[in-house]
Image (tube, grey):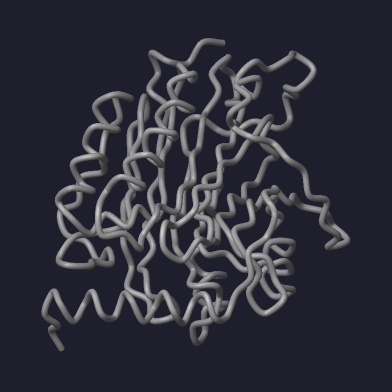
Amino acid sequence: MKYSIKNQWFIFYLSCIGLTACVSSTPYEISSHHPDHSITPTEQSCKNTRIFKLENNQLTQHERLDPNKISILNWNVYKGSGDSWDTDFKLLSQDRDILIMQEARLDDTLHQMLDDQGFHWDLTSAFRYHNSQVGVMTASKIKPVSLCSVHSKEPYIRLPKTLLVSLYQLADSSEILLVANIHSINFTFGTEAYAKQLQTLQEILQHHNGPMIVAGDFNSWSDGRMDFIGQLEQNLSLNSLQYKSHNRTKIFGKAIDHIFYRDLTPYELTTPLVTSSDHNPILVSFSVNRNNQQP
């Protein structure tokens, strides 16, 4: 069924009301993996650029990504509330090195699935939903050497949208891979708050000189929003994935989930259809460009 622009805005408005009725906001924090399922919240703001100044004792040889293949899943998992989402998650996350998730709800089911596959994870919480933390989560087969987060409040519903930046060391290289996981501001009539969030992202990422992946749910459902994303790409020398065809979720005819990259070569790109979330995932692998690998 097709909806007019007016009706689609009305659906957006009802979504705002429904969301705020079911959730409560949480303090700014990052929660990280613990085998016993305990959670230790820490405050690590990206406003402190010391995360990019790594000491030698932060880097260990056994915790490095293979620069020849870094396999990625980017997916808004809809708080794990869709039918059979756990089945889809197990299949999609299999053999992935890094999982970049939005609307990840840290309940026992997700925690156990991550444990079973040997993932370290970090989540920056936006709100609580059914007594579980929800936010952007980046999970990986190795622990990041540094990370930080940013909260940006939705102008109308006043709930945070979150950003998580993680740094990973590459094997046989002095290079550090930056992975930024963003859930962009959605419920606005203008673009001021949206542009401010992307500007904050740019100000953080400009401190990093190496390879980079910027991925997430950008809520890029208007030409104005896409213009700001284009500026971000240009200013950070990012590339966008080239899709021959794709199943990425669209709003107002525009894809809203994206993966951008720098100093990397993508391959094995797929966008499978799922019914367990209101977003379809993006799966891709990268190799680090050899001229950037410095033993």
User: Where does the image place residue 291, in percent across and percent down from the top left?
Assistant: 38, 13
Q: Nearer the viewer, residue 130 or 52?
A: 130
Q: Quadrant of the C terminus?
A: top right
Position of 51 with respect to 289 (left or right) is right
Q: Is residue 83 above or below residue 253?
A: below
Position of 238 with respect to 288 (left or right) is left
Q: Is residue 99 above or below residue 60?
A: below
Q: Is residue 266 above or below residue 117?
A: above
Query: Residue at (65%, 19%) from the top-left corner?
Result: 50
Query: Residue at (64%, 35%) from the top-left corner?
Result: 45
User: Where does the image place residue 162, in percent across and percent down from the top left?
Assistant: 53, 50
Q: Nearer the viewer, residue 7 or 158?
A: 158
Q: Is residue 167 above or below residue 281?
A: above
Q: Nearer the viewer, residue 203 or 180?
A: 203
Query: Residue at (11%, 79%) from the top-left corner?
Result: 4
Q: Quadrant of the N terminus?
A: bottom left
Position of 111 with respect to 201 (left or right) is right
Q: Nearer the viewer, residue 84 or 12?
A: 12
Q: Residue furthest front?
A: 156
Q: How many marks?
A: 0
User: Where does the image place residue 249, in percent across and percent down from the top left?
Assistant: 28, 67
Query: Residue at (31%, 59%) from the top-left corner?
Result: 188
User: Where does the image place residue 39, in percent across and percent down from the top left?
Assistant: 82, 56
